[in-house]
Amino acid sequence: MEKFIVKGEVQLCGSIRVNGAKNAALPIMAATLLCSGVSVLHDVPFLRDIKVMQDILTLLGAKITRENNALVIDTTYVSKVEVPEHLMREMRASVFLMGPLLGRFRKVRLSYPGGCAIGPRPINLHIKALEKIGAKVTESFGFIDAEAVQLTGGEINFDFPSVGATENAMMAAVRANGTTIIRNAAREPEICDLQRFLNAMGGKITGAGTDTIRIDGVATLSPVEYRIMPDRIEAGTFLLAGAITRGDVVVDNIEPEYLFSLTDKLQEIGSQIETGASYVRVKTKELRGVDIKTLPYPGFPTDLQAPMLSLLTIAKGTSIITETIFENRFKHVDELTRMGAKIKVEGRTAIIRGVPRLTGAIVAAPDLRAGGGLVLAAMAAEGISEIEHIFHIDRGYEGLEWKLQKLGAQIRRQSSN
C-alpha cells in the first residue's frame, strides 16, 4: 500500500504534456482482437487498467510487448473466448471484450465486470445491442454467454447514450453481415477515436460524434499502426489543478474543443483561458462559485466532477453540483469535510459553501476520480495532507506525482506502514 504526502498552498506554474486517453486505449486494445496479426498502438499510458487489459488479452492468447509508450499486440494466436473471472472483477472496461470476441469468433463467455464503486452500471444495454444484431445471450450463475451463428446488421436504439454499449455494438457490428444503425448513440470523443481505428483496420463506419452511427459490416479487417487520442480527463484535471492553486499552467498535447464544457466553467469561475491549436493555458487569481450539472458529452463530464468539486470548496459564495450520470459520485465528500470543506449532499446534488481555505488531513481515495479530486484539494490546503488508497488513482493517472512536481507541487509517494 502506498500514499501521497502533499504540502499545500503552492502555486502551480509551467507546462505539462498529457498522455493518450485511457478511455480510448482500452476499447481500442480490445478491438485488436477483431483480426489476426500485429497492431501497434502509440501513446498508450502505463496504468493499472491498461495492465489488466494486457493480462486479459495475454490469457486469451495474444502476445504483447511494450516499446516506450507503444503497445505491440499480436493477436495471431488468440483462440480462447472466455475472460477469466478474477480479471473481469478488477476492471469495468473488461466488458469491451464482448463485441470483439463475438465479432471474430462468434462466441464469448465472461462474468459481470467490476471497477470503481461509483454506482450501478448495468450492462443490459450492451446485451440488448448485441441481441439486435443476432447474438443469443444467456445469463446464469454470474456469467454471461453470447454466441451467434452469424451476426446480421440491425437497428439499435439506446434508451440512454451509453459510451460502453455504443463502443461494444460498433466492434461487433463491424464484422456483421449488412448495415447496422445505432440511434441515440453516445457522442464522446473516445467513440470518434474508436471509429478512426476501426476504419483504419478496414471498417466502414460513419457518424461517430453524432447520435446516429452507421456501420456497414465487412468480412475481414487488418492490423494497423495507430496513435491514441489525448486524454481529455487528465488534461482537465491539470487545468483544475492550476486553477485551485491560483497558478499559471499550460496543458499541451490536447484537443481544446473537447474541453469547452470545462474551460467555459473555468472562465465563469474567474480563470483566464488561452487556447491554442493543441494547448490550453489557465491563469487564476480568484475563484467564484458556479452551478454545474454533469451530462453526457458535450455536457460537463462526470469524470471531472470530483476535481471540480474540490475547487469549488474554496470558491467564494455557494455552488451547486448536480450529478446525473452516477449516483455514488459524492463518496469523497466526507474526506473533503475532514479538510474543512462545507458540503451538504441531497441525493444527487451537492451544495458547496466556499471556505477561505482547506486544512491538511489524512484522507483516503474512494475511487479513481475522487482520488484525483483529493490530490487537488491537498495542494490547495494549508499544511500537510496524506492521501491513502492511491491504487485507485493509479488506475487513471500515470505518474501523477512527478507530473505535478514538474509544475512545482510538493507531493511525493510513500509506502504505507
Image: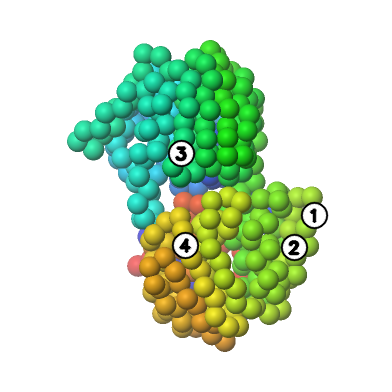
Q: CA distance from mark 1 to mark 3?
A: 36 Å
Q: CA distance from mark 2 to mark 3?
A: 37 Å
Q: CA distance from mark 4 to mark 2?
A: 27 Å
| Element on which disc 1 rests | loop
Q: Do the residues bearing badges 4 and 2 touch, measured as CB atoms within 8 Å?
A: no
| Element on which disc 3 rests | loop
Image mark for residue 276: 1
The amino acid at mark 4 is Glu
Q: Which residue is mark 3?
A: 158
Sequence-first disc among 2 and 3: 3
Q: Which image quadrant is residue 222 in? A: top right
| Element on which disc 4 rests | loop
* Rendered residue at 42%/56% (across/down): 326
Decide if residue 361 is on the left or right side of residue 184. left
**Residue 235 rendering spot, x and y as whole percentages:** 63, 56
In terms of depth relative to the viewer, which is nearer, 324 or 197? 324
Q: Quadrant of the N terminus?
A: bottom left
Sequence-first disc among 4 and 2: 2
**Crowd tier of the residue under label 4, counting other residues whose Cα lies within 10 Å: few below 14, some 14–19, many 20 or above:** many
Q: Do the residues bearing badges 1 and 2 touch, measured as CB atoms within 8 Å?
A: yes
Given this view, does label 2 or label 3 mark the residue nearer the observer? 3
Decide if residue 201 is on the left or right side of residue 50. right
* Rendered residue at 40%/44% (across/down): 92
**Residue 2 rendering spot, x and y as whole percentages:** 42, 62
Sequence-first disc among 1 and 4: 1
Q: Which residue is mark 2?
A: 281
329 versus 78 height, above or below: below
Q: Which residue is mark 4?
A: 323
Given this view, does label 4 or label 3 mark the residue nearer the observer? 3
Q: Quadrant of the C terminus?
A: bottom left
Q: Would you say residue 152 is visible in this rendering? A: yes
Q: CA distance from mark 1 to mark 2?
A: 8 Å
